[in-house]
Image (cartoon, rainbow, N blue to C red):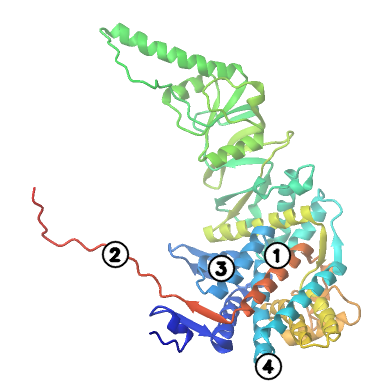
Amino acid sequence: MFSVARPSDLLKKGSKHLSGLEEAVLKNAEAVKQLSRITRTSLGPNGMKKMIINANQKVFVTSDAATIMKEMEIVHPAAKMAVMAADMQEKEWGDSSNLCVVFCGELMEKAETLLQMGIHPAEVVVGFSKALQQFEQALEGLVAYEIKDLRNVDEVSKVLKSAIGSKQYGYKDLLSTLIAKACIQVLPKNSTNFNVDNVRVAKILGGGVNDTTVIKGMILTRPAEGTIKRVTNAKVAVYAGGLDLGKTETTGKLKIESAAQLFSYTKGEESQFEKEIKSIADAGTKVVVVGGTISEMAMHFLEKYEIMVLKAPSKFELRRICKAIGATPLVRTAAPIPDELGFCDIVEVSEIGSTKVTIFRQEKENSGISTIIVRSATHNSLDDIERAIDDGVNAFKALSRDKKLVAGAGASEIELAKLLKTYSDENPDQEQYAIKQFAEALEVVPRTLAENAGYNASDVISALYAAHSKDGKNVGVDIEAVGDVKVKDSADLGIFDHLETKRSAIRLATNAAVTIIRIDQIIMAKPATGLQAPAPRKGRQFNM
């Protein structure tokens, strides 16, 4: 008979069983807090960068929390829950993933205090859930600004500065204007159908960030194949395959008995191929884009009929070119009909820095693609600016779904903390302690902004509460303050956060924290070792 003295006796040898407050709950809380401490110092405009070397020895230098967590390859199960919440925030809204992790870590710290006081985890969970519900209701009343015209570059760039400033603080004015122009150029009539993939980024090494520009159209980071380098008012034919002589599906033999027969055979093949190229030129085609190989004979006839030739590096680039110029990709090597042709005002080869690129520029026609040409001195800088642009484009996408904004720089968090503390006094049960701790957890945003700016965090928090008690609900941390006053009205400074993005980040962080608090036991099976093939013996002989 088996004697069962402990739960671990039920499991295979080598398995682990952890239970109780110290072994399970607090260890999980500590893991999430450690992750939060890593990303917290990267929050806000003065956030520090992290250098991460991944398993492939690629170096990342960034303050983007989504990239940091992705490349760190977190393995702790509880910390992975926080990472999954941040990943969902990144996929849904494209921003505030750092806020999600930092707030989750702060909630776990507050929950740890409550649990050590003797409050049951169920009471903590109910208190946090009530606080979240009250938070979402109160957030609606803190709208500080609402976008009126989504096609106004000045109005949109003003709002995008906050999202871009957290990654590229010194270039927020330049990048916010460029991103606003790029997004508005491809904004459909129904703004809710805006697609972030329609704003492309072309990274070209050299120059400075101030040389970054935006064009209405598409860029290929490679030159044209032939000698024709510039075409205006061009009709463009796009072929998904290559341009080459056709091949038969069956093999056959041909008997040639003289040089004249050989010459006439190849001549007939050439004349047939020339007819195909001529029919393409007769359709008005000035530019041909191909996704496959181009034979020398095809290049010869294309040059003869003065057709510019471009080769797309991938099928994805081919699709984007079609979207930019309104063309239909063809799978047959034949003359396109008028509806299958695209149109582009200017197709030209240009040299940016030391890189030759081909530009599809639309000046009069509408384009389905807009491209931001990023310039910088290093590859790491180019990658970091691309992440900032990605955040800006996702912020525009969020605005296309909901135009409401709340005051940034920690202003809305302090106001909500004040309201939740008042609400906690209305709850007579032990839940009031959890609600009050939830309110204090919201202070992590202005506290972190103050710490990263080099201020005394306690003094700044006190000043914020004093200002908010006098109806200054939009007062936040001023990181550019001169003198002793470190707080100022965020609406006057033009610092705004998207309401729905903030709501989603806090909701996901709270849900992750509540899930982790509910865990009272950790059961780990013995890791599988797997079967390994035996190494071959040296000098082994085989009998034939």
Residue type at mark 4 is Met
- Which residue is label 1 attached to? 165
Disc nearer the start of the sequence (1/3): 3
Q: Secondary structure at mark 3?
A: helix
Residue type at mark 2 is Gln
Determine which quarter of the picture holds residue 326: top right
Q: How far from the left and from the top, in percent, is residue 377?
A: 55, 57
**Dot 1, crowdedness within 10 Å: few (<14), some or many (≥20)?**
many
Please tell me the numbered disc located at residue 69: 3
Determine whether label 1 and label 3 are within 8 Å by CB.
no
Is 535 on the left-hand or right-hand side of 218? left
Please tell me the numbered disc located at residue 156: none
Specify the quadrant that holds the N terminus: bottom left
- Which residue is label 2 attached to? 532
Is 85 on the left-hand or right-hand side of 126? left
Q: Nearer the viewer, mark 3 or mark 2?
A: 2
